């Protein structure tokens, strides 16, 4: 991520929560909606006026399309023979 004030790149750590092995789906959803670093950051930059809800929705849609395109491209690539893996 690029820091606009210093024009330097910074690493952003993203934590996730998925404990479906010992939590109900409702508990997982509750934790992820409250503790998502991405959601917290989005609320922060929208609140500061650096970003808008519309920009966020458009960017999310564009990013999703890019990821799906990359998946489709990767699925078209022939897999190498297993004997070349070692």
Image (cartoon, grey):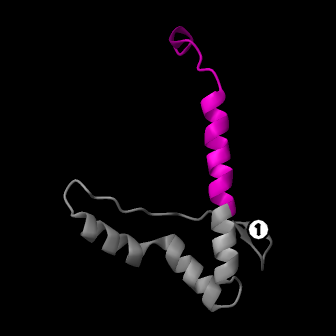
Residue range in magenta is: 62-86
Q: Is residue 10 visible?
A: no
| Image coords of residue 35 (percent x, y) | 40, 75
Circle count? 1
Q: Nearer the viewer, residue 1 or 38?
A: 38
Residue that extends furthest to the bottom in the rendered view of this protein: 48
Q: Residue at x 53, y 63 (%)?
A: 13
Q: Nearer the viewer, residue 52 or 15?
A: 52
Q: Nearer the viewer, residue 25 or 51?
A: 25
Residue that extends furthest to the top in the rendered view of this protein: 83
Q: Is residue 3 above or below residue 18?
A: below
Reply yes or no: does residue 67 show up in magenta: yes
Left or right of residue 50: residue 44: left
| Image quadrant assignment for residue 55 | bottom right
Residue that extends furthest to the right in the rendered view of this protein: 7
| Image coords of residue 36 (percent x, y) | 45, 72
Q: Which residue is mark 1?
A: 8
Q: Quadrant of the N terminus?
A: bottom right
The rendered magenta stretch, by its main secondary structure, is classed as: helix
Q: Is residue 84 visible?
A: yes
Mark 1 burial class by Cα count in 10 Å: few <14, some 14-19, many 20+: few
SS at circle 1: strand
Left or right of residue 10: residue 34: left
Left or right of residue 75: residue 58: right
Q: Residue at x 61, y 91 (%)?
A: 47
| Image coords of residue 45 (percent x, y) | 64, 83
Q: Residue at x 69, y 82 (%)?
A: 51
| Image quadrant assignment for residue 56 | bottom right
Q: Residue at x 28, y 58 (%)?
A: 19
Reply yes or no: does residue 28 show up in magenta: no
């Amino acid at each position: 991520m690029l820091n606009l004030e210093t024009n330097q790149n910074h690493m952003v750590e993203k934590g996730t929560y998925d404990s479906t092995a010992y939590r109900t789906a409702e508990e997982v959803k509750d934790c992820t909606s409250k503790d998502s670093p991405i959601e917290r950051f989005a609320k922060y930059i929208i609140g500061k006026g650096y970003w808008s809800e519309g920009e966020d929705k458009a960017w999310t849609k564009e990013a999703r399309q890019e990821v799906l395109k990359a998946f489709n491209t990767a699925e078209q690539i022939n897999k190498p023979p297993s004997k070349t893996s070692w």
